[in-house]
Image: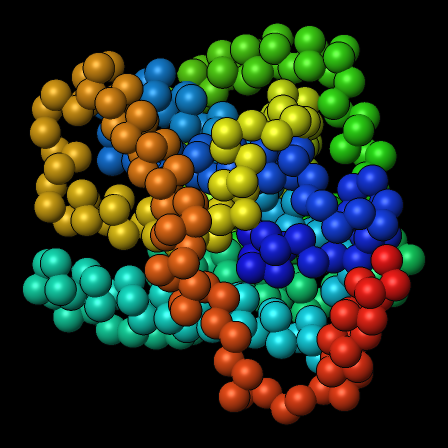
Amino acid sequence: MSAQTQRGRQPAADRPGGSGSRQRDAFFDNAKYLAIVLVAMGHAWEPLKGDSRILEGVYTVVYSFHMPAFILISGFFSRSFDMRPDRLKRLVTGVAVPYVLFEAAYPLFKNAVTGSHEEISLLDPWYLTWFLVALFIWRLTTPFWKLVRWPLPLALGIAMLATVTPNIGDDLDLQRVLQFLPYFVLGLCMKPEHFHLVRRRWVRIASVPVFAAALAVGWWAVPRMNTAWFYHRDSAQELGAPWWCGPVMTLALMGCSLVLTACFFAWVPRRHLWFTALGAGTLYGYLLHGFLVKFGDYRGWFEHPWLHRPLGEIVVTVLAAAAVTALCTRPVQRVFRFAMEPKMEWAFKQDAAEQARERQKPREKAVV
């Protein structure tokens, strides 16, 4: 979901299809757009789900796969990342700088709306910004995961250990960074043909009863399971469970998440649709929709009784989907590009190799 991922500047060998074409893959843009819609809907459901067992069951199912799907795609498009200066520069401008700006903007926004005195802390990610911290750390460690012999088992072991280590603390939201790490590493290990496997017709057909069963289990689990397990931000001890539940839940949740993620990918359209282009703006929709949700929360909009009825929940769902869709559009991207994708040429030394590549591009076009 980073700017680098969204611009689709990966080498041809790293893109789905592996051809020399520089065209974006509609499947991945569609998947990112649909996932960000689910993210926005989930955030809008949070203040309402306590009054509806059905809504909380749906919320649980969505939370079990929407971020894993996003993270897996981010890992897949990070396969070409190395310590080359131009890629490090895009990591800073497309991930680190937006984190600093929005980590300051969210508490300042709360102070302006509520009159509170929330402090700004770059070490304690606020609301949605944890993903940027996580993506920055994951991508920096990409060369290591490409070096080791068994990257996924190692990442899974780290995630399991994190769930039994409550003294990790809240700095940089490291619990989430470590517990979601296996999904990113899995994305690094995947190849384009793996995505083709889940787009077969029989997988689409099988995904229908799987999702139906997941919804039934989600409804059943509402009074029996702590939803916080799906956030991956606390250890087992912090959730009031025995330590051994941490590793067990890590394995169980990852299994469920991957099955539902595969079912989700199976139904993602492969062709260009009206929302395909919006997949390039998911970072904008992700970071900006939080202001709308928080504004409604601060103003008490979600406390209206009619919103806690089925019709009100449907209206909130539609509004959340429409709002995040609007925030992914090109006009919004143009307005907020200074914060999401700043060029910042003044902050970096000129790399001779990158300059040579830029000079070579016009010559290659002339030859073609």
Q: In the rendering, at what x and y percent does residue 311 appear? A: 22, 15
Horizontal relation, residue 45 to residue 268: left or right:
left
* Residue 162: quarter of image: bottom right
Q: Is residue 258 above or below residue 182?
A: above
Q: Is residue 210 visible?
A: yes
Give whichever of 157, 151 is nearer the camera. Answer: 151
Q: Number of numbered discs present?
A: 0
Q: Is residue 250 left or right of residue 197?
A: left
Q: Residue at x 58, y 43 (%)?
A: 70
Which quadrant does the C terminus fall into? bottom right
Q: Residue furthest front?
A: 366
Left or right of 73 in this view: 241: left
Residue at point 42%, 55% (across, down): 333
Picture residue at 75% right of the left edge, 25% below the top: 198
Give the farthest residue toward the right. Answer: 149
Observer able to see residue 174? no
Asked which quadrant contains residue 312, the reply is top left
Q: Specify the quadrant of the image occupied by residue 25.
A: top right
User: Which residue is at 78% across, 42% downward?
Assistant: 16
Q: Is residue 69 above or below residue 266?
A: below
Residue 113 as seen in the image, left or right of residue 1: left
Residue farthest to the bottom, as pictured: 349
244 or 324: which is nearer to us?
324
Q: Position of residue 120 (x, y in %)?
A: 29, 74
Residue 155, x across and y down, in percent: 73, 54
Task: Tell me: residue 94, above or below residue 1.
Answer: below
Colouring: rainbow
19 or 291, nearer to the observer: 19
Q: Residue 284, position in %: x, y? A: 43, 52
